[in-house]
Image: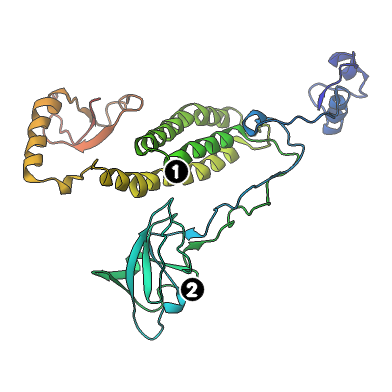
Amino acid sequence: MSLNASNTRSLQHIADSLAGYDPNSLAVVQAQAFISELVSTVQGVEHLALRSALGRVLAQPVHSPIDVPAHDNSAMDGYALRSSDLRHDGPTALKVVGTGLAGSQFEGVVASGQCVRITTGAVMPQGLDTVVPQEFTTLQEDVVRIEPGVVRAGDNRRLAGEDLALGAVALPAGRLINRELSLLEFNQRVLAQAQDPTVPLLERLRFLCISSSNLDEFFEIRVAGIKQLQHDSPRSTSPDGLTPAQQLTAIHDRATRLVAAQYACLNRQLLPALASAGIVLLRREELDDDARAWLAAYFEREIEPVLSPLALDPSRPFPRIQNKSLNFVVRIEGEDAYGREATLAIVQAPR
């Protein structure tokens, strides 16, 4: 709808012409008549890029050009196998012949009696139809053992097009495109660059970092604004008809999937690829004695002198925490300057 340029009557003129008009108790039917005097139907149709269509009404439905997901893939970390190989009268023993990682596909041939180690989101190898979670298996050398009854045919597999099939309506006509959810979808496309094995490795890591920082900014600005709106006007609706609470629920669901995909990309794709290229990030338990000694000396010399613990106790307000800072809640012993027993403190990690 748009303002009718040919209608020159003022709002007050129209209001005065409505029978029984009371500005303090305007009936819905009267309000509708009031609005209809000022607007006319939009007849034109524009063709825009999706990102330029935020806040506009779709004149035609948008159909998905692909299956989502594009291929059958694993919904679990575990072992992909043929359901016909599962025994029901005793344990099943299968030889592990390879690994399928998220964002890639195991290209080998998997014969009967064999299986493939697979991660969440990895494309199912050809001919395999079931995934058994790794916690339900035991592995000895290259043979995995599966007890009967822990998995059924087709378990833990997501089918191609399960979320959205090729040609299905992704956005119906007449719908407004929610700006906040569109921003999350844009961030998903940034993450897709990090998941693309054809992109140079360090560039993939850069795209993952961009996706993460974009999400931080999204919550700091966009979600904070919706939270404020929920407090000030909880019954208000966005242009696409969602209340603040409904928007926050939709954002939570979409952002949860996005963050899970970010961690899967880092832990199952980028870190193994970086390790293969000679860039290894070691966990604490993987350090040798020399590295541990160097870290301890570095901490005592460079880090500990600049740490400033902030005590937590009921007599003081909770301390202000610097934005985007990493903080630890720690247990402490001893007394403060007033002789009170200290138990908890916040320590900000130096930047």
Seen from the viewer's position, the closer of residues 203 and 44 is 203
Q: What type is the residue that disc 2 sits on?
A: Ala
Which quadrant, please, contains the N terminus?
top right
Seen from the viewer's position, the closer of residues 260 and 84 is 84
Residue 260 in the image, given as x and y percentages of width and height: 42, 47
> At 30% from the left edge and 48% from the top edge, which residue is drawn?
272
Q: Secondary structure at mark 2?
A: loop
Report whether 76 appears left or right of 163.
left
Question: Relative to 80, does residue 214 appear above or below in the rendering?
Answer: above
**Mark 1 Cα shell of 10 Å, populated few (<14), some (14-19), many (≥20):** some
> At 85% from the left edge and 29% from the top edge, which residue is drawn?
41
Residue 339 seen in the figure: no
Q: Earlier in the sequence, mark 2 or mark 1?
A: 2
Residue 85 in the image, given as x and y percentages of width and height: 42, 78
Seen from the viewer's position, the closer of residues 340 and 18 is 18
Q: How many marks?
A: 2
> At 48% from the left edge and 46% from the top edge, which residue is drawn?
257
Report whether 232 appears left or right of 264.
right
Q: Where does label 2 land, which residue?
A: 153
Residue 123 seen in the figure: yes
Q: What type is the residue that disc 1 sits on?
A: Asp
Q: Secondary structure at mark 1?
A: loop
Question: Relative to 279, does residue 126 appear above or below in the rendering?
Answer: below
Identify the image quadrant of residue 246.
Answer: top right
Identify the image quadrant of residue 36.
Answer: top right
Residue 336 in the image, given as x and y percentages of width and height: 14, 27
> At 86% from the left edge and 20% from the top edge, which residue is drawn?
4
- Mark 2 or 1, which is nearer the eye? 1
Which quadrant, please, contains the C terminus?
top left
Report whether 254 appears left or right of 281.
right
Q: Where does label 1 land, which residue?
A: 196
Residue placed furthest toward the bottom:
89
